[in-house]
Image: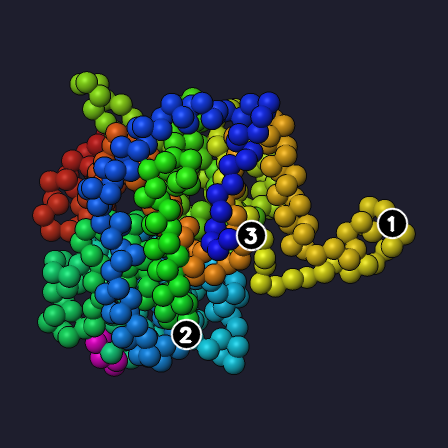
Amino acid sequence: MKGIKFDFTNLFQPNVETGVTEDQINDHKDKIKSIIEEIIEEKPGFMSVPFNRKWIDNVLDIKNLVQSFESVVVLGIGGSALGNQALQTALNPLNYNSMNSCDRKTPKVFILDNVDPDFIASVLDQIDPKKTLFNVISKSGTTAEAMSNYLIARGILETYGVKPSKNLLFTTDPENGILRKIAEEENIRCLEIPPEVGGRFSVLTPVGLLSAVAGGIDIIDLFNGAKDMYDKVINTDVWENPAALNALIHYILYNDGYNISVMMSYSNRLLLLADWYRQLWAESLGKKVDLDGKEVHVGQTPVKALGATDQHSQVQLYNEGPFDKVFTFLKLERFDREITIPNIHCDIPELNYLGGKRLSNLLNTELTGTEYALVEHKRPNMKVIFPAINPYNIGQFFFAYEFQTAVMGKLLNINTYDQPGVELGKKVTYALMGRKGYENMEKEVMSKLEG
Ligand code: PA5
């Protein structure tokens, strides 16, 4: 069967109590059906993304130009960076940027999603600014991190006497915001972030697509994957709808004290999907709600882990620690590269069982070992299985999890698409960095900080 597969067998094994039962799922069947109908009816922005060919065309129109640069540097943060990172890491070799230009036919891709000077300087050291396209991504056009990195990039271009419109490309709101204004005044190329699509749901819009194309990724297949997953997730029968079923499982477990959702990838290339998921799950679902006049705080903490590495770091806790975690493994069936362990030390039993085995076999056997142990310890766990890593499967994953988050938001009775909790910190930064209009806040913060 084409595409990724959600495998819930470890959760529903007869006689093994892992925290959720088939009866519990059946009890929620009608509720899930009406939630899915509501989402289809309300059509939150992300739902129409796989059908909007415009985003693909806008990006493909400038593919040749983008690929004519030696490097493409994305300047963005949160929803304006995490999907890009997940795409590059999954769909290009892990050493993509350090490959020589005979093996790597498309530009190097860097994603600057922090304002750590050591980090920024280390990337700047690796690029020739004159041969670099800086893709500034900010829906609001106000985010301090993206804007400071924009100013740095622009400053460098100016030092080299490069016309900003030649090496800058903005991805921003079609009408509003300071980037749009600058672009219009200076004739800087722009791609649109659809206003109705929230940042963390925007990976399949020009936000994620431009750097994907820069890295030679087939964005049409990415879309096809998302589109096919759309057909699956609009099925109102929870047992036939992997995203809704997964949301419900997480919801039932959450109500039973499972406050943590661990996504553990048994593939280095898939690991940053877990980073993307962390933002989606945390920022969408971690909310304060008013329940009959009482303030209630909801949300399940997403955590990422890497197998087999974290078996030697986290798995002791997973098996014997508190019953507060639900596990999702990302399993890859076919790796692009293979290494066979050589037959050396044939007379040493501690080593000779490894000789002649493939590394992928070892890794996936370790996954089976971890699963088995978790089931034995009665820990709820399931898998998302990737037959291979390709754009189609990654597109499926993104869309499934976006829909799953929408369903979970409805189950928790919250607004999935806002993020009021991040605003205060942003404003304090503006105030303390001297942004005009925030003088009163600066005084208030300083007096509280200084006691
Ligand atoms: O999901 C979100 O809305 C946020 O994580 C934003 O993507 C993030 O804060 C960056 O915002 P902007 O694109 O406006 O710079």
Question: What residue lies at 32% left-to-right and 75% top-to-bottom?
Answer: 63
Which amino acid type is shown beneath numbered disc 1? Ile
Callout 3: helix, strand or loop? Answer: strand
**Residue on which the image places disc 1:** 348
Percent position (x, y) of residue 187? 15, 75
Q: Mark 3 to mark 1: distance in Å?
A: 31 Å
Percent position (x, y) of residue 299? 34, 31
Percent position (x, y) of residue 373? 63, 32
**Which of 120/349 is in front?**
349
Q: Is residue 158 above or below residue 262?
A: below
Is any part of residue 279 visible from this angle? no
Callout 2: helix, strand or loop? Answer: loop
Q: Earlier in the sequence, mark 1 or mark 2?
A: 2
Q: Mark 1 to mark 2: distance in Å?
A: 47 Å
**Residue on which the image places disc 2:** 107
Q: Earlier in the sequence, mark 3 or mark 2?
A: 2
The label shown at residue 332 is 3
Q: Is residue 8 above or below residue 360?
A: above
| Magenta residue check for 440 | no
Q: Over which residues does the magenta segment extend?
A: 161-165
> Is 243 placed left or right of 330 in the picture?
left
Question: What residue lies at 11% left-to-right and 51% top-to-bottom?
Answer: 436
Q: Nearer the viewer, mark 3 or mark 1?
A: 3
Q: Mark 3 to mark 2: distance in Å?
A: 27 Å
